[in-house]
Amino acid sequence: MTTRHILDGLIKWSMRDRWAERFEAILEDHLIEACDEAGLGMNDIVSILGEDLFMSTAWACAFEDFLTREFERGGNAIDDYLKRGGRKESASVRTYLAAMRHSVMSLYEVSDIVRGTSFLARDLIRGGDPVLISERSATQSLRSWDRIAARLVQVGPRTEIGGGLLVFDHETSEILLESLERLDSLSSEEKRELAEANGYDFDDEAFMDLSPTERLRVSAPIFTTFWLIDAIDRVRSPQIPDVRNAEGDEVMLCEARFPLAARTAEHDIRAGLEARPEFRATSSTSWSWVADAGDVAKPAAMASKRDRPLQETFTYEAWSDEDSLVLADIRLDDRTLVLSTNSKQRCDRGCALLSDVFGRRLRKPRVETTSIEQIIASRNSGAPQQFDIPEDEQRAIVHDYLDRHYRDVLDQPVPALGGQTPRAAVKTAGGRIKVVEWLKFMENRSANPSDPNNPMDSYDFTWLWTELGLSELRE
């Protein structure tokens, strides 16, 4: 049974009379700061996020916060429901509601995901050992080292999570943690206002001495606020990843089609390509244009030369079995010589090279380009993708490349490690902490749970932790 079904009766109960007014006030607490920040009305948030996402995130977090509140002269919604309208609920539902009654929202780091079964959650605010969470649906979309805000609910021997789940990116979660730490520096009046705004009545001295758990209890709307501000910004200003090739060019898929001149035979083209060392035959009608050894730096080395803190940079490249950089694919197709590259700069160089080699035997090319934005738009529209390589072969190719790539990365300067190589950084205590965060970041960003056939999602990073002597910290 899903969390929403467990709470069905309680939700209906809470949407009437005095409880409805109190819930509306709590919901406003969770939305108002984000609305003010974004210049929106509360109804606008539903329109921007969509009703399904809004209900499963902001609304669910507000409702679960409402269920834990003690209202002056009004008690608690769960207590009232179990005494009155919820007497017919099953024992399991009553047990769940009792656990939810005393839950608090906190920020957790996810690891050791078993799809459809469980994951480990480490509390980033209160500390302690990771907790095993029994969960089915959330494990299908979570990635290792994701940071989530959720409520842990102890139901018998099992620890579960509530229905309100917020997934944060690393940067936003760090800002959230800093903001929660700054609560200690609030004045007595500011702390009183925070407590009263969240339905709690503490005198100054008691509020000053709140435990971490009690502080979380009064801070629940803060989690929703930070998540909403980030989510609204992503919808309004979606960030296109900065994808570069090994030479640092912006990736743009380019195809130049050269019609053969009237008196040019295809075997003349084959002979011309086979006579040049930079063209390597891959079939009777296709070739790879490869770079000379040492001409192009490996992606890991290139990464240290660029500093784009506000936008992620990814390297997209193809390498031959001999570790030569493949600059372009060339093929003969129905009396047309086709050049395919991953940047406009390479396309221009390739066109100039082919024109120099073949001269008037080729006519003027027709060039077509596809940007990363267009590729993403095509995927979002549901356009079919054409892959003729078996999935297991794709996986083997990708994993083999990643093994070789990350083996090189261990001895390359990494900007996130202050320009040190990972092997050098782990030699100091501070460096080990940075390397752990760097490994988590790489592993987290490589996964794509929404695509179970994605070869990156099945790549095992364990050997990297072992190689660097950090196995005991991978939790």
Image (cartoon, rainbow, N blue to C red):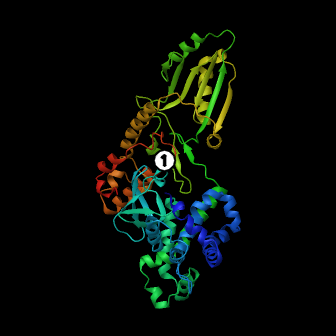
Residue under label 1, please give it.
449
Question: Whole-percent x and y of residue 153?
Answer: 43, 66
Question: Whole-percent x and y of residue 181?
Answer: 47, 75
Q: Quadrant of residue 192?
A: bottom right
Q: Is 97 positioned to the left or the right of 471 in the image?
A: right
- Residue 417 in sight: no
Mark 1: few/some/many CA within 10 Å (<14, 14-19, 20+): some
Q: Quadrant of residue 85?
A: bottom right
Q: Residue at x 61, y 41 (%)?
A: 379
Question: Whole-percent x and y of residue 155?
Answer: 40, 65
Which secondary structure lies at badge 1?
A: loop
Q: Is 24 positioned to the left or the right of 274 in the image?
A: right
Q: Residue at x 67, y 63 (%)?
A: 45
**Label tally:** 1
Question: Whole-percent x and y of residue 309?
Answer: 53, 57
447 vs 132: above or below: above
Residue type at tag 1: Pro
